Amino acid sequence: MPRTTACAILAAVTVLTITIPGTAAQVVEIRLRGHYFSAPATVVVNVAIEPASDHYRLFVEADSERFSRASEIELAGADGKRVHTLQFQNLPEGIYTLRAEVRSRTEILGKATHELRVLGSGAR
């Protein structure tokens, strides 16, 4: 009798909401879908930002002791969209710090961080 093997990719959906200090209290809202992530993990990161004229770039990084991935997105200022989605694929086992920063041309305007754990293969 033939055997069927099912493969699943575990993904985290993380929402980081960034507001600019001085205009409102900094708010960071993080949501994860699931509690465990098996290596190699695919992590989907959604970052919500209030559009503003001085928002120039969004920098998002997943950083661990042995591995790092980063992405940068150009923002459209006051005409930009509110939610930006990035995907980090094949993250190996480790404890990661997720960082999201909204940058002007000269400074960091707002930032959020969150810890993410990726367990070795065979984790449940």
Image: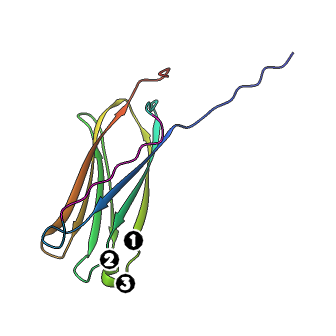
Magenta stretch secondary structure, dominant:
loop
Q: Residue furthest front?
A: 25
Give me the disc on residue 51. 2
Q: Secondary structure at mark 1?
A: loop
- The residue lying toward the viewer, choosing from 20 and 107, is 20
Establish if 116 lies above or below 102: above
Q: Secondary structure at mark 2?
A: loop
Q: Is residue 114 magenta?
A: no
> Is 16 on the left-hand or right-hand side of 103?
right
Earlier residue among tags 2 and 3: 2
Q: Amino acid at mark 2?
A: Pro
Which residue does the image show at 19% across and 74% down from the upper left?
104
Q: Amino acid at mark 1?
A: Arg
Residue 83: percent from left, percent from top: 41, 66
CA–CA distance in space, label 3 to label 1: 9 Å
The residue tagged 1 is 82
Which residue does the image show at 76% across and 25% down from the upper left?
4
Give me the disc on residue 79. 3
In the image, which residues are magenta?
Answer: 25-34
CA–CA distance in space, label 2 to label 1: 6 Å
Earlier residue among tags 2 and 1: 2
Crowd class of label 1 (few under 14; some 14 to 19; many from 20; radius 10 Å): few
Q: Secondary structure at mark 3?
A: helix
Question: In the rendered image, which quarter is residue 82 located in?
Answer: bottom left
Label 2 close to label 1 by CB (< 8 Å): yes
Give me the disc on residue 8. none
